[in-house]
Amino acid sequence: MRISVRVAAALLLGVAALAARPALRAADEPAPAPPKGFVALFNGKDLDGWQGNIDMKQRATLAKERQDELLKLRTKYALEHWTVKDGVIHCDGKGGISLQTVKDYGNFELMLDWKIEKNGDSGLYLRGQPQVQIWDSENTPGAKGADKNSGSGGLWNNPGGDKAKVPLKKADKPVGEWNSFHITMVGDEVTVKLNGELVVDKGKLPNYWDKGKPLPEKGPIELQFHGDPLWFKNIYIKELP
């Protein structure tokens, strides 16, 4: 069977495109090596090292036995809705449980990639405190006033008028594309770079759970559930003195 020159050219272009397209990582393939000085918080294969969330107020007020009971139940629910495929953590937007590290962290540099859909809303809790904001600030109903079209990366739960509540600039990529955070936390000061752009410069993160008190010295890193599908990958941390 003969084919036309036009068809043959199209076939060759299709083969070239497939060859250039990066293949999805196999489930048993090792995750990329962390940047120098960092360790992986996510192994790329499963949620080892992660658990359902228990907030800092519950940790301070509930008896240890009740905490363990609650943590077991929340982790069970979390693992029904937070899953791993092709090196990516995915939340299906159901279940109502956030995902947090089993280990607590004090001062650190944190790097991770995230992705949301239109109207998506999430955030990162640092030392168990809300939050470095992740959202579609153009379309999410919660984005109003100064927050409208402000972009991600701000310390959203800070009081109104605080310099770190609204990002210095909008650095988000279009909804549906991957974004990269580089977050540094020392003491109560947080610096956030989004896609290489400085969006928060040494903003002070307040104690959300015990207002007016100093931040706890350590706490978990948390991926916030907000009722929307979410994707996270390449999560690395470097602990600082």
Image (cartoon, grey):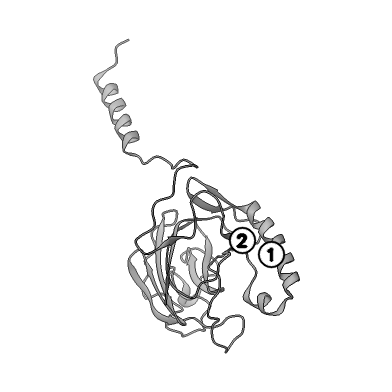
In the image, residue 62 above or below residue 93: below
Residue 103: quadrant of the picture: bottom right
Residue 200 versus residue 102: which sits nearer the camera? Answer: 102
Q: Which residue is mark 1?
A: 71
Few, some or many C-alpha atoms within 10 Å of disc 1 (few <14, some 14-19, many ≥20)? some
Where residue 151 sits: x, y (%)? 42, 68
In contact (CB < 8 Å): disc 2 and disc 1: yes
Compared across the picture, whether 49 is left or right of 183 comes to right
Compared across the picture, whether 62 is left or right of 101 comes to right
Q: Which residue is mark 2?
A: 51
Where residue 58 sits: x, y (%)? 68, 75
SS at circle 2? strand
- The residue type indicated by label 1 comes to Leu
Residue 118 versus residue 26: which sits nearer the camera? Answer: 26
Compared across the picture, whether 14 is left or right of 27 comes to left
Label 2 vs 1, first from the N-terminus: 2
- The residue type indicated by label 2 comes to Gln
Residue 219: quadrant of the picture: bottom right
Where residue 146 sits: x, y (%)? 46, 77
